[in-house]
Amino acid sequence: MLIVSDASPLISLALLDKLDLLDRLFNQVYVPQEVYKELTQKDKPYYDKFIIYLDGKVKKVKDQTSVNILKNDIDAGEAEAIVLAIEEGIKDILIDDSKGRNKAKLNGLIPIGIVGLLLRAKQKDLVKEIKPLLDKLMNNKRRISQDLYNYAIFLANESKQ
């Protein structure tokens, strides 16, 4: 299984020190150049992790016209991730932003967010619990709605008895 990723879920995984989950859940992970540029600026957190992790995972987007059209509504990294997924024939896209997710769906892609990724990891016994991971994300100002948090805890069978 292949996936293209936007920056936000990668930042969340780096914060959790769980970038390895992607390689354990997917055969190949790709990021467009714009996402790589965004993540590997020296003033950004985890940039050194991303330089190592993203080695061999960066792909150039060919259709800049489509990227420019999408950039009217979403940021450049999200736009390139969507176009790259389409160009490569990859249905799954790792993206958290709601506008980006909607654009991905409109383009026939299947958006997966950090919460969905953590749920998959738990289903495959790659993580024991998602609640502490979600708590750490929320405590570090990663945007997860309370409703999504509660639903994920329920789906993971981690709700209070």
Image (tube, grey):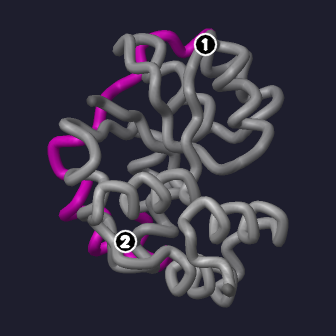
Query: What residue would you read off at disc 1?
Result: 108
Mark 2 or 1 closer to N-term? 2
* Residue 28 colored in magenta in the image: no
Residue closest to the eye, 2 or 72: 2
Q: Amino acid at mark 2?
A: Tyr
* Residue 66 place in picture, x, y as percent: 62, 12
Name the residue: 75% across, 70% down.
150
* Residue 41 colored in magenta in the image: yes
Query: What residue would you read off at disc 2?
Result: 47
Label 1 neighbour load within 10 Å: few <14, some 14-19, many 20+ = few
Q: Secondary structure at mark 2?
A: helix
Residue closest to the eye, 99 or 27: 27
Q: Is residue 1 left or right of residue 67?
A: left
* Residue 125 place in picture, x, y as percent: 29, 64
Q: Amino acid at mark 1?
A: Gly
Range of magenta residues: 40-65
